[in-house]
Image (cartoon, rainbow, N blue to C red):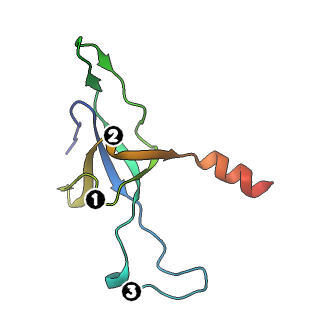
């Protein structure tokens, strides 16, 4: 099934966190918190302002984003647990190229 969010909504898949700490301790499923990081799968066309002009979203499909702990609505599409949230619930976009450049330096 193909899903297209409306207005300023975004479809996000949670990115699973590590099951071990840096010290090597395994974290059981019952003690894990839901990840606050995800991958944008689809975005709506944007929101309309007071004059009716369409304002495009800042995020796009493929972006890795951080969002609030209680953000979005959980849905199940094609057997996969996903989140639908407004763009305003997204705290920021993670830039993978900046991370790799910082590690190389």
Per the image, label 2 sits on a secondary structure element best described as helix
Task: Name the residue at the front extreme.
Answer: 50
Per the image, label 1 sits on a secondary structure element best described as loop
- Return the disc, 2 or 1, that comes first in the chain's sequence: 1
Judge by depth and name the residue closer to the eye, 81 or 99.
99
Left or right of 62, for residue 13: left
Q: Position of residue 88 (x, y in %)?
A: 33, 40
* Residue at 65%, 52% in the rendered image: 99
Alpha carbons under labels 1 and 3: distance apart: 22 Å
| Residue for badge 2 | 88
Alpha carbons under labels 2 and 3: distance apart: 32 Å
Judge by depth and name the residue closer to the eye, 91 or 7.
91
Other-residue count near label 1 (Cα within 10 Å), few / some / many at <14 / 14–19 / ≥20: few
Q: Position of residue 98 (x, y in %)?
A: 66, 47
| Residue for badge 3 | 28
Position of the N terminus by quadrant: top left
Alpha carbons under labels 2 and 1: distance apart: 13 Å
| Residue for badge 1 | 70
């Amino acid at each position: 099934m193909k899903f297209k969010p409306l207005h300023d909504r975004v479809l996000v898949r949670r990115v699973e966190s590590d099951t071990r700490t840096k010290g090597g301790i395994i974290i059981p499923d019952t003690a894990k918190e839901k990840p606050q990081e995800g991958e944008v799968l689809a975005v709506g066309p944007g929101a309309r302002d007071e004059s009716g002009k369409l304002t495009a979203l800042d995020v796009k499909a493929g972006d890795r984003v951080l969002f609030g702990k209680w953000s979005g609505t959980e849905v199940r599409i094609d057997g996969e647990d996903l989140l639908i949230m407004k763009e305003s619930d997204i705290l920021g976009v993670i830039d993978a190229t900046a991370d790799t450049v910082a590690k190389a330096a």
